[in-house]
Image: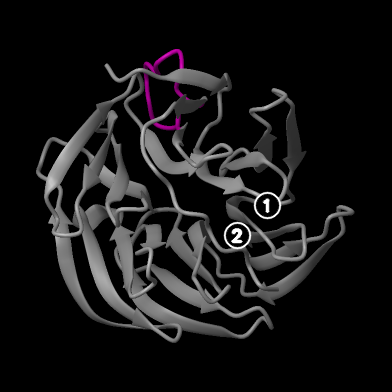
Amino acid sequence: MTAYEVAVRAEATLGEGPTWDAREGRLIWIDILGCRLHTYDPATGRRATRTTHQHIGAAKPRAGGGLVLNLRDGVGLLDPDGTFRRLHHDPVPGRRANDAAVAPDGALWAGTMRYDEAPGGGTLARVAPDGSVEVVLDDVTVSNGTGWSPDGRLMYYVDSPTRRIDVFDHADGRVSHRRTLVRIEEGAGFPDGLTVDADGCVWVALWDGGAIRRYTPAGELDRILRLPVPRPTACAFGGANLTDLYVTTARTGLTAPSPLSGSLLVLPDTGSGVAQPAFAG
């Protein structure tokens, strides 16, 4: 078992989206089905929770302070004073938000999926700071991990049921030349959330695999981090030096969850992360 610590002991139904907020020195994470937005300051141990008015897929820092939220019915902005306003409203019955990530140009790439996980029922869309939206992928089942290489020239993406991590060429907010970087073998779990480190390697959480894997830019497996939970959902580097790997976990669907299922875990001094861009809106 990999050396780990419990950053926040919790029973999140579907913990997701760990994100380091460098401006505030805190880790942001969410409980999608619990409609909760969590923050954790590792320097002080201070924790805070805000309830959202609907299921929340992701929360990311904004350049001017506050957060951008990927919500069931679209994308919203949460100001530093707690004021909420919609940026893009697009309710679709039976569909909810899932993972999201901020691109190097400050746009939000926001994923959706059907509650029943119907094939092709989800999307991946680029949401610009002015609220304009371009659907990039419209035949997605469970839109999950999205991340960019350190130079911004590659975008990595997971549609979980495919068992693949795909890679695209990325330039000027557009992607092309989709190909498979990694195919996760049967029995190893499903790829979920991911992050990219300073070496350009991809770290991916394996739902039902109880592990985090690190793949090189060539798609070679070079590390496996075993975890005490069956359903890790996503990972992100945080802390002052971006060397601690935070991992969110889930309890949903488990008849006998681990005592730590739903908690926020941290693996200290595990790698070397890259500072993530903030949403420009």
Q: Secondary structure at mark 2?
A: loop
Q: Which residues are magenta?
A: 249-262
**Residue in the foreground of this view, choosing between 242 and 176:** 242
Tell me what residue is drawn at x 39 percent, y 72 percent: 152
**In which quadrant is the N terminus drawn?**
top left
Check whether the beta carbons of the residues at disc 1 and disc 2 lie within 8 A of each other.
yes
**SS at mark 1?**
loop
Instruction: Name the magenta segment's main secondary structure.
Output: loop
Residue at 66%, 73% in the rendered image: 280
Q: Residue at x 84, y 55 (%)?
A: 80
Disc 1 residue type (three-letter): Gln
Considering only vertical position in the picture, is 90 above or below 20?
Answer: below
Q: Give left or right: position of 114 versus 34.
A: left
Residue 123, horizontal then vertical, whole percent:
42, 71
The residue wearing badge 1 is 54
Instruction: Name the kind of residue labelled 2 in the image.
Output: Arg
- Say whether residue 261 is magenta: yes
Rendered view: 78 above or below 140: above
User: Alpha-carbon neighbours of circle 2 within 10 Å: few (<14), some, or many (≥20)?
Assistant: many
Query: In the image shown, does 24 or 88 lie closer to the viewer?
Result: 24
Q: Is residue 249 above or below residue 217?
A: above
**Residue 4 at what x, y percent from top left?**
41, 19
Residue 143 is marked as: none
